[in-house]
Image: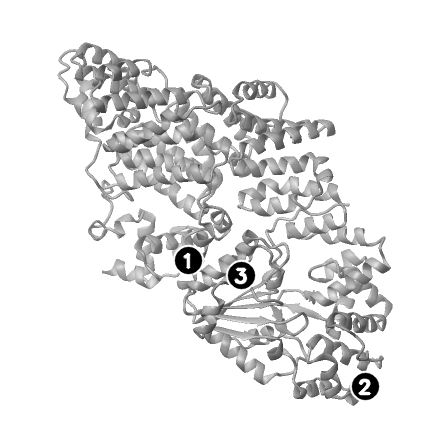
Amino acid sequence: MQMSTPTAVFALAKIQPPRLRQGLIERPALEQSLQRALQQNRLTLLIAPAGYGKTAALTRQIELLADDCALAWISADEDDQLQRFLGCLTMALQPFDLPWRVSPQALGTLALASGGVRAVADEIVNALALAQVRRGLIIVDDAHRITDPAIFELLQAVLARLPEPWGVAIASRNEPPLPSLARWRAGGELAEFRQFDLRFSENEVDALIDHVGGAAAGLSSQQLLQRTDGWAAGLRLSLTAAAADRRLPGAGIATQRHLFDYMASEVLDDMPADLRRFLLRCSVLPELTASRCAHVSQMPQAALLLDEVERRGLFVSVLDAAELTLRLHDLFRDFLEDRLQREYPDEWPQLLRRAADNEPDLVRAVSCLIRAGAWDEAGRLLEAQAQALLMRGAAPELEQMLAQFPAAEFEARPGLHLARGLAAFTSLDFDQLVVSMQAASAGFIGQGRDQAAALAQAYACIGLENTGRLDEALAGLAVLREREIDPADLAFVCFASAWGNYAQARTELVAGHVGAMLDALEQQRDPQVWDRCFFLSLMTGLPGMRAQLERFAHGAMRLTADRPSQLRAGAMHTKAWLAFSQADLDGAAQFLARADDDCRWLGRPRILMTENWMAHTIIDAIRGDRERSLEAAQQNRHDLEQKALPANRLSHEYEEIFTHIRACWILGEDAMLRERESALARLGNDYEWMAADDDRQFSRALVAILDGRLVDARDLLATLELDVERSCFYPATQARLTLAFVECRLGRIDAAAASLRPWLAAARAGGDIGGALLCGPAVLRALADADWRDRLDAADCRLLDRLAATFPPRRPHAMPASDASRPPVVRDDPLLATLSARELEVLERMAAGDSNKLIARRFDLSPHTVKRHVANILDKLDARSRGEAAARWRR
């Protein structure tokens, strides 16, 4: 069986509201009350058992909405987790062009962070507040299906701050677990419609009987009410049966469920054979369209039969879609599926397999295959889609689908181990990464899939590098490099090899592996292949790496263009450090600001933020922005201590602390430096990389300088002034220049000059000079002012003086002060000064009254990019609307 590959996070039918059905009678009392509630209340609840017409009541209200009312409809499913629900909500809101500050696709990623649900709610509320609508409604139908408590936590947080033009309606069989319901009820902000409110009155039953006519005309409305208690589903079945001159059930039917099944049997058995078989076979589909029904039922007259189902009104909703799309009522689908399995048990698995064909919703497709026991097909589907799911922040959905496999079925399928390993890599769970990828590799080898095994082995080696097994990792990677491997996989093998050698401080080998990685990557046009290797900026300054990093940044930008992505953020971090390497602080700040925009837009994923926080900790400290530097260090520390899994923390905590220590040195935060040095001294484990002991030694040297123990500092620094960098952020350069400073303080000018001359010669030959800035302003000024006489030549002294002068007075972090292209009004307004040059151009056109489309056409940008610029402008100016931002520009 050939099946298409699902690509959507969810089926679009989930956000298509039903259309008003022909023949629905008017119910003035209910409709007027419900209309008033939807127009005025924060929250409207419709709570009643199945079949009481909750969806139908809302559908009629949709038809009555004013043209300027925004509607976002979501039909909930049992499979919905928070990330999937967010995808539905943001897609349903897409027509209203909300100015998102975070990519709607990244809200699921943002939700995974500490306090993430609250942060996501804030983003939604801010976007809704800026919508240009008179009234907006968010409707969640079938909310009783939701099992993820995080969705109700989100709804609670959104409702608590819901902007005035918006309201929410929830239809459910039971009361949603929202903690503030009692308070909203007491404050008059909640409207409720329960079973009593939704049941049909005698007059409405009379109207139903008149509408059906025929044999039903002789029925007594009182008799029907007594039998059904105004239950809409029971009334419809009773009237359908009566119209067909079928026997009505007596009072002995015990429950509504039994009543429905009894009467549905009467209706189903009275259908033409083709229509009956068609309905039974198609009950496995969540929504019915002619093409999908024809494929599943294998009945060529499917389109005609679907029209007949719609004409008969057999417990279906007609969705607001371009082609005829029906959704079976839960009661009816459950009944039909039960009959299908009892009458045609042999057809059941094959029908589910066919339902998975052409299903765009991956969760639904996998669910169908698993219900059919089609473990191989489900496993292959997840293996093929795992990387794409993780790139769009759908790790929880991937884990949810993996959890549906019984242990024995899971263990037998290496593709599922690969998918779980990829999820572990995204969350930096290195222990699970090793276990899953080694199992995947063994399974692939058993299947003869050597290429897939090689990729799994490379990922396992990344895990080994981070779990104290460096030698084993490098040996495994050496074997892989000797094999014939697809270039896409070879690129990742070389990436892992570069990091393995970095971890062992054999940094003279890193550039060769990165070069081989790029040779392989440059044969690929798939951004996903490049995206595996995005994390390279910490290698700035290593031997031979400048050209390779420039090459990587160029290739990454060529593939990503103007769309935010993990790969583009990695390229921006790399560009920031390349600018820093030349002591170009303004350039470094500009690229880092662009990386910030992408990180925020992508929901600040942890795998990006470690790199981002470390860059801000150092670069902002050198730029004199104490607050932002220390804030980044604190966020990095909190993330590692509160969110990181054990292997990640054990292998890399030393790096986070040492980066913080170096920022404290630059900023003159002596007490904090001492506290962090004590914390670093207490660390030490088999997971740490080779640079950890050098970092501890360097930190002791800095404390010795603070204590005035200069001889101790000299002895500690003497073994750290290497000719090549062995770790991130130029420790060898900083050690060499700091040692020269100590030697000067000890009166040993000749020794200081001897330390400086090799580095100065390399700098004059075009080497990196930015690392010297990590010595801090006091050290560099002391070196620049020292009496070198003929020990250093004039060019060397000028370079030292230039570096010492690099440190600015305290200034805003958002944009470099040297941006002379800004008009005077921008330099006079501190908030406008935070905007980039492009954002200023967009704001100027907003003030002129241009729409997003006109702005996109004027600057040759995509509409997506313009919307992102508008969101950034509103965010940076703390503006609540486009008009408020434009007014600031005009002033």
Q: Secondary structure at mark 2?
A: helix
Q: Which mark is residue 92?
A: 3
Amino acid type assigned to the residue bearing label 2 in the image: Ala
From the viewer's perspective, is the residue at label 3 or at label 2 nearer? Answer: 2
Q: Earlier in the sequence, mark 3 or mark 1?
A: 3
| Disc 2: which residue | 215
Residue 293 x, y percent position in the rendering: 75, 60
Q: Secondary structure at mark 1?
A: loop
Amino acid type assigned to the residue bearing label 3 in the image: Ala
The answer to whether one can see residue 136 in this image is no
167 left or right, relative to 493: left
Mark 2 and mark 1: span between their CA atoms?
57 Å
829 left or right, relative to 336: left
Query: Which of the image's four quarters has the N terminus?
Result: top right
Mark 3 and mark 1: span between their CA atoms?
14 Å
Residue 248 x, y percent position in the rendering: 82, 80
Q: Residues within 10 Å of mark 1 (few under 14, many from 20)?
A: many
Q: Are marks 3 and 2 in contact (CB under 8 Å)?
A: no
319 left or right, relative to 163: right
Q: Earlier in the sequence, mark 2 or mark 1?
A: 1
Residue at 65 percent across and 44 percent down: it is 403
Residue at 25 percent across and 33 percent down: it is 669
- State whether residue 423 is above or below residue 255: above
Residue at 65 percent across and 39 percent down: it is 383
Mark 3 and mark 2: span between their CA atoms?
43 Å
Residue 323 x, y percent position in the rendering: 66, 64
Amino acid type assigned to the residue bearing label 1 in the image: Pro
| Disc 1: which residue | 99
Residue 768 x, y percent position in the rendering: 32, 23
